[in-house]
Amino acid sequence: MQLRFRCLHGVSRAGFACAVSLAVCARVFGVAADAPASAAQTSAPQSSSRPNIVFIMSDDHGKQAISCYGATAAPGVVQTPGIDRLAREGMRFDCASVTNAICGPSRAVMLTGKHSHRNGFATNDQKFESTQQTFPKLLHQAGYRTEVVGKWHLESDPTGFDHWDVLVGQGDYWNPTFVADGARIKREGHVTDIIHREAVGRLKQLATGAKEGKPFALLVHHKAPHRNWMPAARHLALFREVDIPQPATYFDRYSGRSVASSMQTMQIDRDLTWEYDLKVPARELFPDRKLDGLDSWMQKELSRIPGEAQRAIAEAYDDENRRLISRFGRMSPKAQAEWRFQRYAKDYLRTAQGVDDSVGALLEELDALGLAQNTIVVYTSDQGWFLGEHGWFDKRWMYEESFRMPLVVRWPGHIPTGSVSSALVQNLDFAPTFLAAAGVSVPADMQGKSMLPLLAAGGATDKPFRDAVYYRFEESKGPHTVPRHEGVATERHKLIRFLDIMDPMTGEPMLELYDLAADPDEMRSLAVDPAFAELRSEMVRRLEELRSLYGVDAKPVEIPRLLPAAS
Ligand code: SGN
Ligand code: CA
């Protein structure tokens, strides 16, 4: 039998051994029909020992930037001790994926346990129908105290929370405005540190209730490391003396795939702006050119942030910027692309470092408050991220880097420490998992599955958790012009169907097909290779099967306005 390593390819690239045991792999290999949640999915009994839940999520954090995943972006250089601790004390998922790799829609999936076409929030220009059923509402109904602090990004106000304190829209990195239970509050400082501070404040309050038998679910949702990557002052000098290795696919020109990849506008060498993204004064590079809209915004932004931070930023970038400006005219496009990668990757990693600081400190706070034992702690991101792979920043695609999200879960006494799972879990599964852990029935209309049996078994269950996952991205009219697509991924293969691009040969929507074991970087689509015609038909069949399972073509379901009683 061949050892599964697909979702670990990043780890093995960095020279780490496959962490999945043969026994686990053997079990994962079997075939099982997937089934959405049924009303019977329950677990922990309702008692005073019901666990608390701390659900930490960042925005756009790729596994390549996390050391328990091998930090393949810069092995040995990037260290994330906070998230690593969580993995050491709990379980790391290597093949977790999102159903739609875009911010607001991913959050809606997590809250509802339903695919985007069912929860009604498929693109960021929509508004989440906040009267619908969500896991915080069901937990609240079951006696939990529910709170959310940080990024929300669903357009409508949070509902189902006893307390909410969220950023306005995307939120600013410095001196951001929050809305707390309906009232606007301007706070001074860096957004990651503010969210952390508020989360710790809430934890202290919640600890008292928890000790008196009132369990809580606290959602701590960071803005970082979302674009435009503005690190806290203490991280500005990180990585200054090192080169971040360029991904092998950085200069990909997409010749091995369909036309779809060439349609995007998310290339580091072309689409990042000098001032807003790369922190280089654009006027000095192009004195005669009018400033890009984002660059002008950045100039205003810099004047708005605290004086001390302004000085730290100027000092951090100044020397490097001067050196760039003085030789810019003599640099080849390739040299410019390489320079841009370094600045981009370092700022991204610096910004992500603040999130890891927060995770580590939150774990210490849980220890200090005596809450660690009876609290499920989750760390994840709303999707993965391109850190230069294929030349890209951003997300959206069903390609590995954005499709996979980091996921580590700790629940002392319930999850074997240091376990690793390659199960095909998705962000769809959070809601059923939290409900099951709280002993609350999972409503039959949720499409995800509780991960509890998998967690309890240290990843090694008799039947595979799921044998294929469905994905669908709809926001082709949004930033970065990524065409609409859907797809299916199994343990080893992935089929992507571009809904609006017709294949001139077949007259049907364009397909891409990948063998992730042979081609983990997805550089050569097999969709038009006659040698793989059978595999392609089989994957199309599986895609159709999942579309039917999840009701993709069914008449749009009216989003329930009233919360159905938990059955
Ligand atoms: C949003 C998107 C980013 C995108 C910017 C700018 N994030 O912030 O992916 O780069 O817009 O877009 S999302 O979480 O809301 O999807 S641009 O068109 O101005 O370049
Ligand atoms: Ca995001």
Image (cartoon, rainbow, N blue to C red):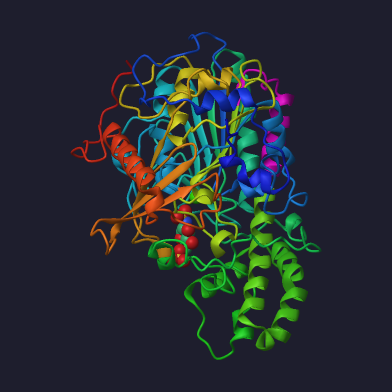
Residue range in magenta is 354-376
Instruction: Indicate the quadrant containing the C terminus: top left, top right, bottom left or bottom right.
Output: top left
In the image, is residue 544 part of the stretch drawn in magenta?
no
Question: Residue 376: where, in percent of width, then height?
Answer: 59, 24
Q: Position of residue 189 (x, y in %)?
A: 65, 54
Residue at (60% x, 38% y) in the render: 5
Q: Is residue 552 left or right of residue 495?
A: left
Q: Residue furthest right?
A: 241
Furthest toward the left, the residue is 555
**Residue extending furthest toward the bottom:** 288
Seen at 55% across and 91% down, the residue is 288
**Screen quadrant of the N terminus:** top right
Q: Quick check: is 361 in the magenta stretch? A: yes
Q: Residue at x 57, y 59 (%)?
A: 389
Q: Position of residue 99 (x, y in %)?
A: 41, 41
Looking at the picture, does residue 446 appear above or below residue 71? above
Q: Can I make out residue 193 in this image?
A: no
